[in-house]
Structures are given as C-alpha cells and as structure tokens.
Amino acid sequence: MIRSFAERDPLWTGILGTVAVALVLALAVGAGTVLFPGTRRYADFRENTGLRAGDDVVVAGLVVGSVRTIELRDDHVEVAFQVDDDRVRVGDRSTAEISAQSALGRKQLLLRPAGAGDDERIPLARTKVPYDLAVLVQDAGTQLGQLDAAQLAKALDTLSETFADTPAQFRSTLDGLRRLSETLNARDAALADLLRHADGVSSILAARNQQILELIRSGSVVLAELNSRQRDILALLANADAAIDQINGLVADQREQLRPALNQLLELLRLLEHNRQQIHESITRLGPALRAAGEAVGSGPFGDIGLANFPPTDLIPLLPELLARRPR
C-alpha cells in the first residue's frame, strides 16, 4: 500500500530530499564538465572593440577555445574565455589582444602564452585593444566637424603675411598651407558627407557580417569541391581528347571507302533538287488517291468496290420478273 507524503515521517522525507538535490547538483556539475571541457580564464581590457561571446580564441593561428562572456567591471571590460587545449598555459607573461579576424569586422581574441605558471587572469598591463577603422573614420569626422574652417584660413593668412619677408622656401610652404585651408573650407560639406557615407557603409557591413561570411564560406565549399574533382575533370578531358584522336584516325582510314558513298549521295541530292517540282506534283496528286484507298479498306478486313452502271440500267425493270420465274 502506497502512503501519501502527509503520512510519511517529515524527517526522513527532508533527508531524502536533501540527498536527491545534492545528487542532482553533482550530476549537473559533472555533466557540465563532460559536455563543456576546458579551462576558464579571464582577460581585462580597457574597452571592447567589437568582440562578442562565441568569437574564437586563437593561439599561433590555431583556434583553441572561444569567448564565453563579456562584462563591464568598474572602468574596464572583463572577457571570460575558455581554452579547450590542455597544452595552452597562461603564464605570468602571457598577453592577450583583440584583433580583426576578417576585413568585415569579425573579431577574435589573440592569445600569446608566455612565462611560468598557469594564471587565471591576464591584467590590463598585458592586454591590447586595436584602433578600429570604423572608429577612426567616425572620430575623424567628429574632429573635422569641430574645426572652424574660416578661422583656420584666417590664421594661416595672417601667418603667411607675417612671414612675407622670409626665404622663398618657407613662403612657399606657408602658401601651400593657406591653399590647403582654402580647399578644406571649400570642401567642408563634401568631406562631411563623405565621412557620413563611410560611417553608413561600415555600419551596413557590420550588420551584414554573418551573411557575407556565409557567402564566403559557400564559395569556399564550391572551390573545395572543384579542387577535389580536379582529377576526375582532368581524366574526362584526357578521355575526350583520346576519343577525338580515334575519330580522326577512323575518318582518315575510311576516307577512300567513304568518298564514293559521299559522291553518290551528292548525285542523289542533285537529282532530287532537279526533279523537285515533279516530286511535289506527284505527292499532291497522290494524296486524293491514297485517301480513297484508305476509305475503301477502312470499313473492315475487306475492300469496297463501286462499279458504275452495273447491271445495265435497261434490265433493272425486268429483274423482278426474271427472278420470279422458276426453272422447270
């Protein structure tokens, strides 16, 4: 008989429940270790320039792990990454760098193991963040937008007038600076528009990064398949070349036998061309005759024949009397 929980001893129920929860937690930790092997390490960066969770961790050109989480810690960014290769040790002189994996903005964590020991964290002193091209364009647009082009041109004109009595080389340099300022002033709107478009293009490329990478991977798969089929394609071309050689040899060997046949065929074609009108008229007149023959034999396994004026029309009235007479 099965008892309900209300009828059971609460003490033993609590003990068994605690043991069951502990077993479930142990199994979960063990399963996590089996399913997600590797060593968790951390690296501190002053800023994050496009690195995302799931990006590759690379050592000497080989992928050895992946980025797990990216979190803000006070005035810096903490990147947690997992190293799946047991041979990689993060020593006390190891460095980490966020670098570009592709020209489309995909990033990777570049790890350079060095030193003794196996530290858990790489501090800010041994990490490096590259300057992104999109950030460079954006900062350049911001800085140029804050320049007062008219004031800059006026300052350069004043400087040119002040050094008017200086040697010719220095004056030419100042004249070049003045012309540069005038050009910047005249092209200020065009430069700002160009920088805005460059920022928009970089944003679109960053948004379409995954699709472009998939397109490149698909092209790589096609090229790899063509490369793997290279031997078959070369064998096919070689066999086709051999077949052409055999056909040419056959034609050369049978030329004497084929020439009379070709000459007779040419004569036949000339004869048909010469009598084309007669053949056309014969076919035209043969049509009704063939149609009548088809109607004659189309009723069954016999032929229909029509005889005009048979029997003679003058004997038709006498037929009943002749048929009525009986021989004696």
Image: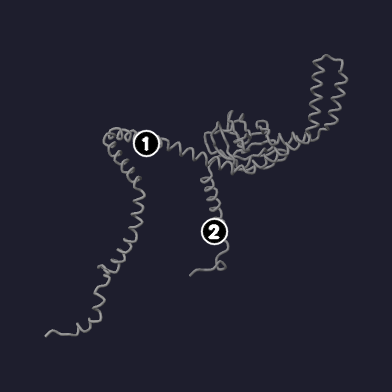
Determine crowd level at label 2: few under 14, some 14-19, many 20+ residues with C-alpha closer than 10 A.
Answer: few
Q: Name the element at disc 2.
A: helix
Q: CA distance from mark 2 to mark 1?
A: 79 Å
Q: Name the element at disc 1.
A: helix
Quarter that holds the C terminus: bottom left
Please provide percent x and percent y for residue 12: 55, 61
Residue 137 picture quarter? top right
Q: Residue furthest front?
A: 314
Residue 95 relative to residue 85: left or right: right
Q: Residue furthest left?
A: 328
Q: Which mark is residue 221?
A: none
Residue at screen point 32% across, 36% down? 247
Please provide percent x and percent y for residue 301: 25, 67
Residue at screen point 56% across, 64% down? 9
Question: 130 and 25: which one is in front?
Answer: 130
Q: Which mark is residue 16?
A: 2
Q: Residue furthest top?
A: 167
Residue 298 relative to residue 175: left or right: left
User: In the image, what residue type sits under mark 1?
Assistant: Ala
User: In the image, what residue type sits under mark 2?
Assistant: Leu
Residue at screen point 27% across, 70% down? 308
Q: How is the image coloured?
A: one colour
> Which label's residue is closer to the chain start, 2 or 1?
2
Please provide percent x and percent y for residue 290: 31, 61
Question: 157 and 148: which one is in front?
Answer: 157
Question: 25 and 114: which one is in front?
Answer: 114
Residue 223 relative to residue 136: left or right: left
Q: Which residue is mark 1?
A: 240
- Tell whether label 1 touches label 2 (CB within 8 Å): no
Determine crowd level at label 1: few under 14, some 14-19, many 20+ residues with C-alpha closer than 10 A.
Answer: few
